[in-house]
Amino acid sequence: MLWALAIAAGIGTVAAVIVTVTTYVAALAGTSYLLVAALPVLIVGQIYSYRAIRARRVEERRTMVPINMQGRVRPLRDPRRLFFGDLRRDVATTLIVLAGLGIVAVLTAYPAVSKGGLDGGGPGCPYRLRTRTDTVCVTAAEYDQVRAGQQRVVAGILVGFFSVHMGVALSGVLRRDGLGRRPDDEPGDPAAPVDLQGDG
């Protein structure tokens, strides 16, 4: 199950990145089919990620030493540990950066999508945009720009979610198989998985 989720989220990440990059040049045809295929993976990945992260925080509260007499504990402040507890730090950092680039892609689409929504066409005006108060006639280039911007918003969001879901699922696989120790974990780090088998 976890391997299937990790692979599906990885494929979704790659597809969303391709769509995101392409929309900087022109809009793509058939992206609605990709969105339909992505929805089940997105829903399952979100449910699993929420449960995994919540379980990690509960485990943290049980295992970390209180920092004062009131019994409060330090939270997992590093997003790499919070989302991808058992992944190597370089892999976790790459996934965080990838999710951040998805957010950047969404922001770069704002100038295009703020012009209005696609409203098809009609006699004398083959390309129309719908604003809050009116419908305006635009050129084919402007229409395609808005369409590409809308696709980039959706693809950028999917890049962010899928990259996180893939990392969380991979972390779960490593934790389940006892392969989660990172070479750069510090001794005594309460967030680091414990090797119960030892070297002997």
Image: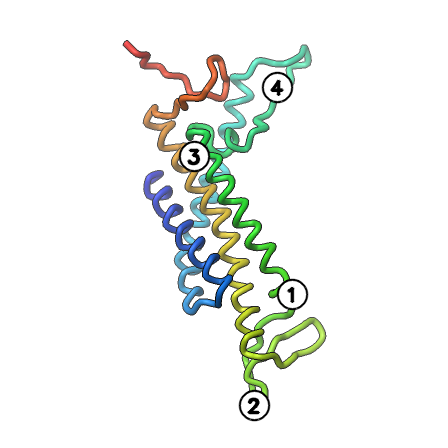
Q: Taking 14 as reference, is 165 above or below it? A: above
Residue contact at pointers 1 and 3, CB within 8 angstroms: no
**Label 1, label 4: how many angstroms apart (C-alpha)?**
44 Å
- Give the x, y percent position of residue 155: 49, 56
Residue 114 image label: 1
Nearer to me, 61 or 168: 168
At mark 3, the secondary structure is helix
Whichever of callouts 1 and 3 sits on the residue coming sooner in the sequence is 3
Instruction: Name the residue type under label 2.
Output: Pro
User: Dots 1 and 4: beta carbons under 8 Å?
Assistant: no
Percent x, y for residue 145?
55, 69
Q: Secondary structure at mark 2?
A: loop
Rendered-image quadrant of the N terminus: top left
Q: Residue furthest left?
A: 200
Helix, strand or loop status at disc 4: loop
Q: Residue at x 44, y 21 (%)?
A: 184
- Which residue is the site of mark 3? 91
Residue furthest to the bottom:
123
Tag 1: amino acid: Ser
Mark 2 and mark 3: span between their CA atoms? 54 Å
**Nearest-to-viewer mark from 2 and 3:** 3
